[in-house]
Image (cartoon, helix red, strand yellow):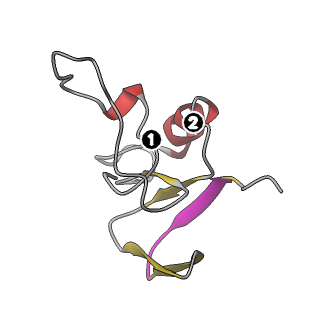
Amino acid sequence: MVLTPEVGDDFIQWRPPSGDTSTLGLVDFSICPHLAPEGRPGNTLAEAEAWAAAISAPAYAVDDQTAFRVVDGEVEVVSEGTWHQLRRATP
């Protein structure tokens, strides 16, 4: 998540005295991790969709069997689990 442009208030548990919540921004999308089915530990798809509504970047919700490969700005989702693209990049 630290590689994304923003993580959103839902995932910020501590703020430095300056109040700065910026991240590294090495990729152009944000991630809602630990996607889990209803009733299981983790974030539900409904929670991920609500989080994505407050994110300005394209966003994905991913479970623990999902990763990303980014080469020359091209994003590839590598997964044996479940993932959802919640917000697409706008041209």
Residue 58 position in % (x across, y down): 63, 51
Q: Are marks 1 and 2 in contact (CB under 8 Å)?
A: yes
User: What is the distance, in whole Å, between disc 1 and disc 2 at their CAs?
Assistant: 7 Å
Q: Amino acid at mark 1?
A: Glu
Q: Nearer the viewer, residue 42 or 9?
A: 9
Disc with the residue nearer the chain's start (1 vs 2): 1
Q: Is residue 83 magenta?
A: yes
Q: Counting other residues with Cα less than 10 Å from the Cα at mark 2, is it few (<14), some (14-19), or many (20 or more)?
A: some
Residue 14 position in % (x across, y down): 18, 25
Q: Name the side, left or right, on which 50 lies relative to 66.
A: right
Residue at point 30% right, 25% down?
A: 20
> Which residue corresponds to mark 2?
55
Q: Nearer the viewer, residue 89 or 65?
A: 89
> Which residue corresponds to mark 1?
6
Q: Secondary structure at mark 1?
A: loop
Quarter of the rendering containing residue 50: top right
Q: Secondary structure at mark 2?
A: loop
So how many labels did they put on this image?
A: 2
Task: Locate the C terminus by quadrant.
Answer: bottom right
Residue 90 position in % (x across, y down): 79, 52
Residue at point 32% right, 46% down?
A: 42
Q: Which residues are magenta?
A: 80-86
Q: Name the side, left or right, on which 40 lies relative to 50.
A: left
